[in-house]
Image (spheres, helix red, strand yellow):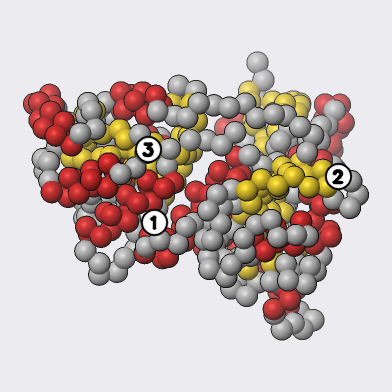
Amino acid sequence: MTKPVVAIVGRPNVGKSTVFNRIAGERISIVDDAPGVTRDRIYAPAEWLGHEFNLIDTGGIDIGDEPFLEQIKEQAEVAIDEADVIVFLTSVREGLTDADEKVARLLYRSDKPVVLAVNKVDNQELRQDIYDYYALGFGDPVGVSGVHGIGMGDLLDEIVKHFPEEIDEVDDDRIHFSLIGRPNVGKSSLVNAILGENRVIVSSIAGTTRDAVDTQFIAADDSEFTMIDTAGLRKRGKAYENAEKYSVLRAMAAIDRSDVVLVTLNAEEGIREQDKRIAGYAHEAGRGIIITVNKWDTLKKDNHTLSDFENAIRANFAYLDYAPIVFVSAKTKQRLDQLPKMIQEVSKNQNRRIKSSVLNDVLMDAIATNPTPSTNGKKLRVYYATQVAIKPPTFVIFVNDPDLMHFSYERFIENQIRAAFEFSGTPIHIITRRRK
């Protein structure tokens, strides 16, 4: 199920990042009193009363010396196109401004629901001033304080009212996989090469693909798959041309619906920070992952080219050390025939279950090899472990005191589990609990 998307939009310095951090539950966006300090669009999964959604802080788009009104226009356009619900944030401190009215006029033209919020309502006296904002024409304004958390429950209640109706997706036995990556790494070309026919528009212009395209197909061994092509961004304005960071939003939507994710890199361009952000979301979501390096045919190679590139991937994606790497070419179809089998194997590993008796034999052998550590004279005691979930495989380890489980020892246990069982391509979650 694709999560709804909520975008926070408004003129500079109304507190978008502060409200974003409050809803997300942690300090993710950079907060500063200087207008326009947020230079990256930040995103985070969020939840309210059982409703999960993806939240976007549109606080900053790098536009160089362009005036802020142009920046506001671009932010609003992106939010209009990408979001299911738009939070129009204003500030009671400065009162209703011309810039607020310009943002409002942009939002009028959208078919998206808009929730009007007035920030910095830090006391009861200021609450009387929010009624001026009825003039914007978006119904009842919600008074909030991002700093103090006042009114956030009311704001979230209003947001979830506008979420699209949830549609239960039909269960099937097909493996759902997606290709995610920065614009112009060759995702659509890979889709076409895998399918063997042009079902997706291919262009050298990053962001040609507008919407996610699901394609069902049968591989040479009669295995059935559903491929989700991560939509790019429509080329319109500087926000789309300059801010490839918006590709993360598309990746998030595809990841939510995937069993296995192909993190796609461009061999010509190497590894970029945006690649790490996109891959990090797939890892955090617990999906199976295959790192796919496209355009491999374009490089001049020697005996060290492949190993050097692989080493660079392992260094930059240290948290994905479990993910297999495959070097492919959409143009020559090099190694593309390996992908269906690799996807099947990763999906199988995602669904693998280990008997508790066998798991505990491995755990006790690991402890015998590397005894549990002590902290302040108190020794960690591991009693037993059991697998509680799949997709990703999740293990609960019962101990005398969870605080004594150092991350390095937890990593040692994970490595021992991986050495004993085939979990290539899938993250493993380990939960430490006190034995009752």
Q: Is residue 210 above or below residue 411?
A: below
- Residue 214 position within the rendered picture, expressed as x and y whole percent measured from the top left: 66, 45
Q: Quadrant location of the C terminus?
A: top right
Q: Which residue is mark 1?
A: 40
Q: Which amino acid lies under the numbered mark 2 shown in the image of this protein?
A: Ser
Real-space CA distance between mark 3 and mark 1, rounded to the nearest whole angstrom: 23 Å
Give how far across and how far down residue 143 sits, in percent.
Answer: 21, 29
246 to the left or right of 315: left
Check the image and report above or below for 231 versus 349.
below
80, 386: nearer the viewer: 80
**SS label for mark 1:** loop
Looking at the rendered structure, the kind of residue marked 1 is Asp
Q: Is residue 408 visible?
A: no
Q: Which residue is mark 3?
A: 112
Mark 2 / mark 3, whichever is N-terminal: 3
Specify whether 365 is left or right of 168.
right
Amino acid on which disc 3 is placed: Lys
